[in-house]
Amino acid sequence: MERRKAPFRWLLVFSVLTILICQSAFATDYRSNRCKNRKGGEFDFGEGGVGCDVSAYKEIPDVMFNYASFVFNRAEETEVQRKEYVTSMVGLIADLARFYIDQRKPNASEQEKKAWVRAILAKGNQETYLSHYRIERDGNIKLTTGDSLYSYGIMQIHRRWHKIQGTDIGVDLVENILYGLDHFYDYWEGSKSKSCVRGREGNSDYFKRRARSAYSAYNGGPGSYCRWTNSGARWAQNDRGYHQKWKDQLWLRHAESHQDDSKSPVDINCLMNDEGNCDKSVNYDAYYDGDKYLLASGETCYRTGEAELSCFQDSRMRSCFKASEGLPEEKKGFVEFEKSDDMIIKTFTNRDLICHNAFPSLIKRHSFIKLNKSINVRATPGGNLVTGTTAGDIYQVLDFDFKNDGSGGRYYLIKVNGKYGYIYAGDIEDHLEWAEEVEANEDSNYVFPSKGQVAEVVKEEGTKLLRSPHEDSEVVTTAETGETFKVYAVRVIGEESLVYLLVQHDGRMSYLYAGRMNPSVTTDSWVKISE
Amino acid sequence: MKDRFYYSLLVLIILGFVALIVSDSKLSALGDRSPSESQQHMNDPVSQSKEIKENSQELMKELFDASESDAERGDLEALQVQLEKLEESQKCWFDPNCELEFEAQSPLDANSHFRKQTLDALIAIKDFLLKNPEYTGKFEYLFSSYVAHQDDFVKEQALEYFAWVEPNQERLEAIMGGLSQSSSVPLYDSATALLKSYHQFGFGREVSSFISHQIRHGGFFLSRDLAKKSLEFMTPETFDIFHRLQEELPENSKTSRILQFSINEYLRSRKLSGQ
């Protein structure tokens, strides 16, 4: 009897080990996809796919303010709510698809534009039942995922098929739809010449064949334009599913409007111009996320008094503000200020000043840092790897940013071997282990001259010296190429971050333009540090 | 008692497995897609595969016949292996019915396998051509078609070849075609760097017109990225193209604002540097 049990026990041990290994593999997979508190979905509008906490990818106030009408609330799962949700979502997708084809193919016929919009709606229906953000019953906002958590959002943007590492493309609802449009458009155009898309515009079902062909290729790659004609194909069920969605237009059963009569609560021009808070249905003063307020105007604020908010437009200042202590706590969610007119809203724009006050250990822009360890350089803070550095290297700080966790964890923008990127440089506690401020020396990697250094004009035609830091200012003289000036101060001005160096010429102070830093850095073409 | 314990444990394990399988299949049920969901063009991969096969067989025969040394023949044999790999990848990558010669646990496995095989082959072929430039004309068509490949990783590798060879009209068209069909933000840097060199090499107006067209009518992500980089393409000979574009763009649009920054810097440069 004992002898018979032995293999059985071994089988058990083997099974336990196998299951542990499997679970560990799955867990690693999920971790790598940043999925927190996953919740299963349903095959119904607004609820498709596996939900992962959106806070791991995007600020919740951003979602609530920009996309309040596009968040399905599972805690209030009623048909009325579904109707509102689908109406808004159909309106948004239809408006974006229309905007898109108007831009890419302005001469397309009205018939084609309508078919394009319908094809996109059918695709959103097929992929996720038009689901992107939803509030779970536990109150957390989720992002729809699929394909074993690799695909994000309404158009199921796959993180591994596409070369989008280091970006968060797919998390933001509008970006997700636009990315899907970019890809589907290629196939929409490609389908024109395929044998299975007979006929031409005006023929019955011509655009249906275009849509089916484009979907097959989108789903199965460029070898699959005609997959939809083969009922025995391995992925034929996807083509049948898409066809069904195209035919039935199920969204119309829920939506109060159809795609030709959009009732999107979002102003599409506002959205495409990144103006912020474009959802017309949001009639609140602010959204409070338990820490800060996001105003309808797009500013972010901290309550610094009973009736006082300190606000800023540049989101990079977020970590440099702190709420005053001892103020009554507000409930998370949308806020209407009781005495809106009495609320004092102070707006701050000087990021350098605010952030240096909050974190005195922050190294100033234009100064130099020595790295105390090798640090990776990334295209954005914490983003795509650009290159590496070596401990002991000295770089000029061009800009800074912070982690949003209040730790004071900072990133510096530097230039390494001709490439710009961000390095992480520690938090309030351990920043000296990462980098420290030093005086520049001949081995320093500089971008433009700093205070105390000597600037050399590199423009072949020379550069005009100005009375004040503005291009329309009175011209003092023209500095020749190769001419050098001691820098007394550096001023960085405006949205383009124009760099002006205060220099002395013939005993008079004047300004030397040294390039801009936004949206790209041009200082190399204006000045260099004199050797 | 002990038996009951073991049986209970066995039941739990079976339930655990069932749960794992169900959860995975449920995850995959949504947005279920075939191995090649990654998109874009390069026309029909099966015809492409045939083209590679036919061209390479013919060419290789010709080259073997003309080869004069063992070393040369050795190089050609190595090249032939890579061409076969390329042809095989292209044939099977996008055909879900293709019989795979390796064990693919998932569609992702198959994709990774073919992507890697294609990238390795392209690198090897590029190296061969750099070593034996006399064959460039015969095999360049591979890079011209792969630069329009549906996989952005492959597209980027094909682009790299063009960084090593001198600019000409056909190559420029291949690069522009490849770039216009990509939504990969990381790929834009290498592609625009190449265009920059063409811009400086006598193709200024052609490149600028392409960029202007893509900013106006290109894909969403490409349009914004090129607007940011437009300053690099503004010269006295091409500025009118961008100035006209700015007038055509919807006022106060995001793209228009980004382009305006480039125009500002260009004009500032003219004004302050006395050009």
Image (cartoon, rainbow, N blue to C red):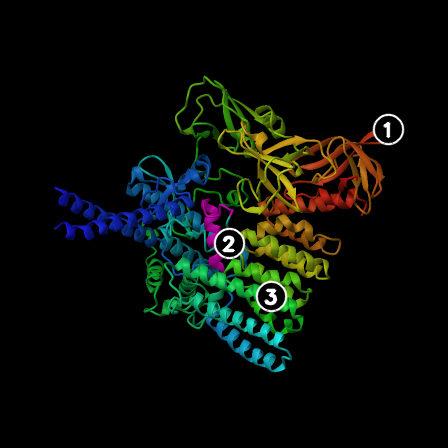
Comparing A246 with A213, the one in front is: A213
- Residue A469 x/y as whole percent: 75, 33
- Judge whether B112 appears above or below A87 on screen: below
Comparing A447 with A229, the one in front is: A447
Give me the residue at 42% from left, 43% from top: A34
- Judge whether A437 appears above or below A256 on screen: above
Q: Magenta region: which residues?
A: A166-186
Residue A77: which quarter of the image? top left
- Which of labels 2 and 1 is toward the front? 2
- Residue A531 x/y as whole percent: 79, 40
Three-letter code for the amino acid on which mark 2 is drawn: Lys
Report helix, strand or loop for mark 3.
helix
Q: Chain of mark 3?
A: B
Residue B172 as seen in the image, left or right of residue A199: right
Q: Chain of mark 2?
A: A
- Alpha carbon separation for disc pair 3 and 1: 60 Å
Taking the magenta stretch, the answer to whether it contains residue A176 is yes
Which label is found at residue A163? 2
Q: Chain of mark 1?
A: A
- Residue B151 x/y as whole percent: 50, 60
Give me the residue at 65% from left, 68% from top: B131
Taking the magenta stretch, the answer to whether it contains residue B50 is no
Q: Label 3: how many residues lie within 10 Å, few (<14), some (14-19) or many (20+)? A: many
- Residue A413 x/y as whole percent: 62, 39
Residue position for label 3: B126
Q: Are marks 2 and 1 on the same chain?
A: yes
